[in-house]
Image (spheres, grey):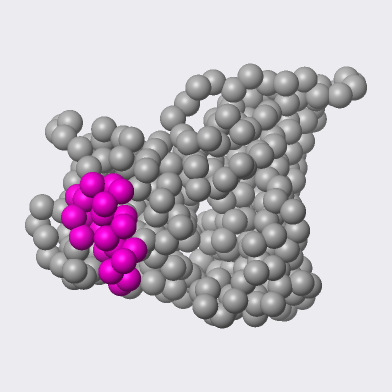
Amino acid sequence: MSNAPVKTALVGVGWWSTPVGAAAKRSPRIGLAACYTRDPGKRAAFARVHGCAEAGSFEEILADASIEGVLITTPNSAHAAQVEAALRAGKHVWVEKPLVNTLAEAGPVLRAWGGSGKVLAVGHCYRRAAGHRVMRRMAEEGAIGRPLWAEAVFTTPAGLTLGPERWRFFRAECPGGPLMQMGIHHCDTLNCLMGRPVRVTGVHKRLATPAEIDDVTLTLVEHEGGRLSSIACSFVTSAAYSMRLHGTEGVLALEMTRENTTFAERTNQETSLSIQAKGKAGFAPVPLPGMPDMIQDELEDFAEAVRTGRAPETGPVEGLFALAVVEGSCVSAERGRPVEVKELLDGLGV
């Protein structure tokens, strides 16, 4: 196995490219050789900060035989075509969540991946945060008995200022609003903690944003084995990130106070985890270990998968099940009844 850094190019210079580029720069496992976005000014600024070349087009990156992998941080609606094109060009692909914007777009991507022999990883980073890693370990070790249900919250007031110049303004570009943009991280983490989703119920409302999208969503997920989880998301209330995992012998409670979501390396320092044992009053703090930040960790997992041929932790299947919770919640909200995940994933081979 080669120990050389995986030579990559980043496509899409938006706000999330900042933490991804910074994580790649910190990692000895990733070499960021080039970047591309349509805006020449943004492209030049990113290249200058991160010490990489400016590509003149996406096609130029795909034609460069020296580029092993592509890191995609473009708007959601661009993912399907770009992931498929990169795989067919023989590139390994890491794509920021969601894998695709809708499950209807997934078929061609999965076929391209299946025929490529390349790694396809999806950027579900929050499950890798130290608090969630410890929460999962403690649950598996029986610290709270048998985990039965979980409640998660992810909110921001950013939707109050959305205008039509922003792609998140539009329902077609951002179906599910805050659930797609933020809550999908909880969808993935809860699937990891509680098991694959079986049935989804959603209530979505547009209460305060000037945008087309719904801005407050509530999602109830029935997981395999009968476990339950709820996800509350908002684009129009104060910032909050939390998760509580309830078991027969206690509760684990996680809170994250994000000073600035652009600085992912601060995540572990801004997280607190505590436990309340059954019959005890109050919560006792749980120490968190020093760990790599969640974005560097996922990029290095991608690099190791490229070098060893093993599957990444969050590949296409994990990406599809997280997206199925989002889409299931949207469909349920429209139909006014629960939606079966099996129905949503029919024909995709997962």
Residue 51 lies in the magenta-colored region: yes
- What stretch of residues is rendered in magenta? 32-54
- Residue at (65%, 80%) from the top-left corner? 212
Using the image, determine if residue 331 lies above or below residue 99.
below
Residue 82 lies in the magenta-colored region: no
Left or right: where 169 falls relative to 217 = left
- Image x and y of residue 248, in percent: 80, 30
Query: Which sits in the foreground, 35 or 250?
Result: 35
Using the image, determine if residue 255 lies above or below residue 117.
above
| Quadrant of the rendered image containing residue 83 | bottom left
- Image x and y of residue 202, in percent: 72, 66
| Quadrant of the rendered image containing residue 220 | bottom right
Query: Which sits in the foreground, 289 or 266?
Result: 266
Left or right: where 188 falls relative to 220 = left
Left or right: where 145 falls relative to 91 = right
- Image x and y of residue 78, in percent: 39, 72
- Residue at (77%, 20%) from the top-left corner? 284
- Image x and y of residue 102, in percent: 49, 72
